[in-house]
């Protein structure tokens, strides 16, 4: 399977319809790292934007497919989403402010996400999981 990098650069390049999105990258089971990379690239381009209903359905399907593939690759880490975020930040020698900067949100939100007083949104879960090498499933609220 070819990679998407040559076709997709930014959110405004995306089709607005489900059919158009499927034509760009048909959703299917992920079998290898190339498939996973293509799905992750699509999720990265879509994450953090206001999606219409077709785009939301398509985005969530790719998140589900990627999550299943990741779960099959290695056992999911244990702990609360907040603990996993903290461990991921520590592994990169980052703090919650770096998380906030990466997500493009106010610095205080980064600290609240790590403390658990605020929860990650679905697009943020996909973005954080890909960036920090975590399973999206592990970041879902318990």
Image (cartoon, rainbow, N blue to C red):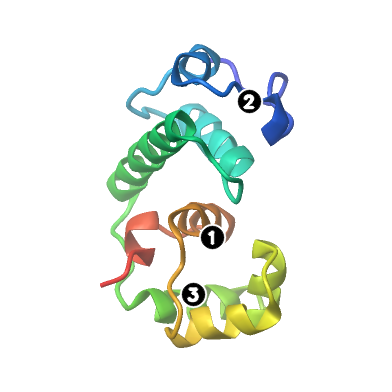
- Alpha carbon of mark 2 to alpha carbon of mark 3: how far? 30 Å
Residue 111's place in the image compared with 58, above or below, is below
Whether residue 95 appears in this view of the structure is: no
Q: Is residue 12 visible?
A: yes
Residue beneath label 2, please? Answer: 14
Tell me the residue at 53%/84% (across/down).
Answer: 112
Where does residue 54 sit, x and y in percent of width and height?
44, 28
Cβ–Cβ below 8 Å for labels 3 and 1?
yes
Task: Mark 1: give few (<14), some (14-19) or many (20+) Cα within 10 Å.
Answer: many
Q: Nearer the viewer, mark 2 or mark 1?
A: 2
User: Alpha carbon of mark 2 to alpha carbon of mark 1: how far?
Assistant: 21 Å
Residue picked out by circle 3: 85
Q: Quadrant of the C terminus?
A: bottom left
**Mark 1 lies on residue:** 128
The image shows residue 2, relative to residue 44, as above or below, that is: above
Q: Nearer the viewer, residue 19 or 84?
A: 19
Task: Please tell me how crowded label 3 is: few (under 14), some (14-19), or many (20+) other residues with Cα within 10 Å.
Answer: many
Residue 71 position (above or below residue 43): below
Say whether disc 3 or disc 1 marks the residue closer to the N-terminus: 3
Residue 119 location in percent, x, y? Answer: 43, 73
């Amino acid at each position: 399977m070819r990679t998407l990098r040559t076709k997709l650069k930014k959110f405004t390049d995306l089709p607005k319809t489900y059919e158009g999105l499927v034509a760009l990258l048909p959703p299917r089971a992920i079998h290898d790292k190339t498939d996973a990379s293509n799905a992750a690239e699509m999720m990265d381009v879509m994450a953090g934007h206001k999606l219409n209903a077709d785009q939301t359905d398509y985005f969530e399907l790719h998140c589900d497919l990627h999550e299943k593939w990741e779960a099959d690759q290695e056992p999911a880490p244990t702990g609360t989403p907040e603990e996993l975020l903290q461990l991921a930040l520590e592994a990169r020698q980052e703090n919650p402010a770096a998380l906030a900067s990466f997500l493009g949100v106010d610095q205080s939100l980064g600290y609240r996400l790590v403390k658990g007083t605020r929860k990650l949104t679905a697009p943020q879960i996909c973005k954080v999981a890909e960036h920090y090498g975590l399973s999206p499933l592990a970041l879902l609220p318990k």
